[in-house]
Image (cartoon, grey):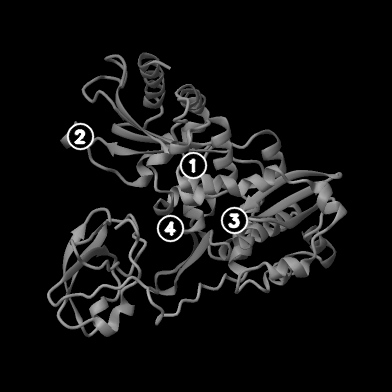
Amino acid sequence: MTVSNVDERLNEIASLLVHIMPECWEQAHVVYSAVGASFEAVTIGGGLADPGFLNEYNRASVGSMREAEELVPVSGVYELLRELRSRMYEEGRGAWWRMVLIVRCHADSPSPSAEGLPQWKVKFEYPQHIDWRDDDFWRENITPAAAYEDLTMFPRNAENIPAWLEQLASVHVPAVDFDPQEILRSPQREKHLTSLLPAGLEELFSAARRCLLELLPPELVDRFQIGRLADGSWSVIAAPPSWLAVRMDEGGCTEVHAFAKPRPAVAFAVGAVLAEAGTEVNSSILRAAGVLSKEKSPRKLINAWTLGDYRSNAGKASRRTLAAARPKGRAAARRRYVELWPLHNRPGGHFVCRPGPPPAKGAFVSTHEIFRWHAENLLPQEAPPTVDPHAENAFPREMLAVGMELDAYVGRRVPLHDRHPVLQQRYAWHTGRASISRLPGTAFLPGLSWPFLPRSDFFHRWWRAFGDLRDRLAWLPPRPSDL
């Protein structure tokens, strides 16, 4: 695809986006992310024009472009974006994963397009430029299946495949090669699968059945199987190095999902069993799943259910689905959905949802996701790895000389120096996106709110060593390898 063809298509996309923007908008940041064929997302941020400061870009809140995001699924922009990404594929290099398009309106024009084509600039990001471990968006949304699809649809040379992408895609290979006849002939013994579980998860399968028994009649719990396949059931199968959640129906596998660890595979299967059984979705389930929280203040006469913040399951689902293409066909027929926004600010009593097809507009979540989150909160956690603190090289160790300083942007938590007699602290108020800096030759000392949150109110804190830290190095956690 030539540069002129790319510009022509971007002109179409920008022109389309202009017409779904709210009134008085000035600049829009449109981010389109896509991996394989199973994941894509659009988010729109930007500034609304202030009549007193026209042409001055003011960063607005997340909700300021909500109206535009709600119109994305019906605007036709997804078709243009998919075609652009596909046609920009370069042999050996692959296809980009993220496009950041900054569109600016003609503020002095009677209409956004009165002077012709909108102004825009664009940036494309490829997976080889993405640090998957440090980006919550990719880590939370990109499945092994999506990574495998992307490498299949858009082949890359070895030098353009990051190690993390290759490893993530390899998790899905057992799902592609899975032969149900092998399991039907020789089912896996649950005792053997239990022996493969990491420390702390010895009761994983028992906990999953207890979760099902709390919400289903005993005769339906058999729809959850371990190591064997049965019609109408979800099964957890070990396929080293992966764990599979498999749906069997009419003698064939209709769904196979691969996971790197057993706990998410079990939670996925439990959630699917509960959703397919038509289990009631009520306020208690939504609260246990991390979708709702209750705000209660008798003195202010407040008793209401509210959606969680952006860090909660509800917040992440809202950002992921507000502008998402609506599920269609078989995917929509297999699932039922709950619209999220009507749940916010409901009276604080018990209520029951009526799941149905995905809404035409607005954020939503499937009942499968709700019950999967519910199961994840009930299943045991994997035990942290044991490390002998006295072993050589057990932790990165550096001697802090007297007077050495370390700094970080951290949230409002208990200052470290209040608990540590050798570190004294000085701090300054800071507003802006959280970040970290490391002084040359110093040890890394993260703030207590690591990983940092993209919020505006942070302290820029400094720590100065004024004593010998030889016996207190355990206070310094291992620093990230990229610092």
State which quadrant residue 454 falls in.
Answer: bottom left
Q: Which mark is residue 322?
A: 1
Q: Amino acid at mark 1?
A: Leu
Q: Real-space Cα distance between discs 4 and 2?
A: 31 Å
- One can see residue 338 in this view: no
Q: Real-space Cα distance between discs 3 and 4?
A: 28 Å
User: Which residue is label 2 attached to?
Assistant: 51
Tell me where residue 376 appears, x and y as whole percent.
60, 63
* Neighbourhood count class around disc 2 (C-alpha, 10 Å): few under 14, some 14–19, many 20 upward: few
What residue do we see at 23% from left, 81% from top? Answer: 469
- Which numbered disc, 1 or 2, marks the residue that appears first in the sequence? 2
Residue 452 position (above or below residue 276): below
Q: Which mark is residue 309?
A: 4
- Which numbered disc, 3 or 2, marks the residue that appears first in the sequence? 2
Q: Which mark is residue 260?
A: 3
Look at the numbered disc 2 and give the secondary structure of its residue: helix
- One can see residue 379 in this view: yes
